[in-house]
Amino acid sequence: MKLLIDTCVLFPTVMRHALLGACKIQGWMPLWSERILEEWSHSARKLGPEGEMQARGEIALLKADWPNAIVSWPAEMERQVWLPDENDRHVLAAAISGSADMIVTLNARDFPRGYLREEGLDRIDPDALLMQTFLDYPEPSAQLADDILQVANTFQGGGWTKRALFKKARLPRFAKAISD
């Protein structure tokens, strides 16, 4: 399965690592565009002067780990698709161009399922995607969560539990599932 990953789920570090870990576990192919990656680095500026620099470093690692994930499309394609938010049309164009099956996003309102289905696409939120991975592969999913927790505790001085970390990362169902 091919998944177009929207900026809003790439930018949060814990969410990104969980989603890409799920892709590895499931054998799914994540997709994104240069514009999506640029939106991520632009959004990271809000974290301060180092935010964009850190994002660009993470983007370089992402490109190295997933060298075939970048999609592009002809300029006219973006003008031919419709979404409620004109600024999200590039995401739909990227998904179509990459032959994605789904768009992974937190932004359900701007990606109406009816219109996406006309394009042969669906959308899924990250929590649902991670829950599906947990149901399909509970042990590798739990190990993924443990690995992410260990990194978070190393970089942030400890104190996180799996449930708290993944709940804060806007993955409440996954947080509960891996903590029970």
Image (cartoon, grey):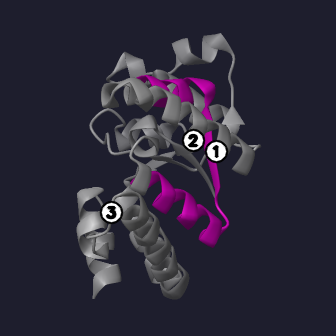
Asked if residue 74 can be seen in this view, the reply is yes
Q: Which is more toward the observer, 8 or 78?
A: 8
Which comes before the other along the chain, label 2 or label 3?
2
Identity of the residue drawn at 45% across and 81% down: 142
Structural distance between the alpha carbons of marks 3 and 1: 25 Å
Question: Picture coordinates of residue 119 (x, y %)?
Answer: 54, 37
- Badge 1 crowding class, 10 Å Cα cut-off, few under 14, some 14 to 19, many 20 or more, is some
Identity of the residue drawn at 53% across and 24% down: 38
Which stretch is magenta? Answer: 15-42
Structural distance between the alpha carbons of marks 2 and 1: 6 Å
Query: Which numbered marker is on residue 13?
Result: none
For marks 2 and 3, give the one nearer the viewer: 3
- Badge 3 crowding class, 10 Å Cα cut-off, few under 14, some 14 to 19, many 20 or more, is few
Which residue is tagged 2? 58
Using residue 157 as the reference point, say whether residue 36 is left or right of it.
right
Q: Secondary structure at mark 1?
A: helix
Q: How many marks?
A: 3
Which residue extends farthest front? 157
Q: Secondary structure at mark 3?
A: loop
Q: Secondary structure at mark 2?
A: helix
Query: Which numbered marker is on residue 157?
Result: 3
Q: Per the image, is 16 magenta?
A: yes
The kind of residue tagged 1 is Leu
For marks 2 and 1, give the one nearer the viewer: 2
- Residue 82 higher or lower than 47, as above or below: above
Which residue is tagged 1? 62
Which comes before the other along the chain, label 3 or label 1?
1
The kind of residue tagged 2 is Glu
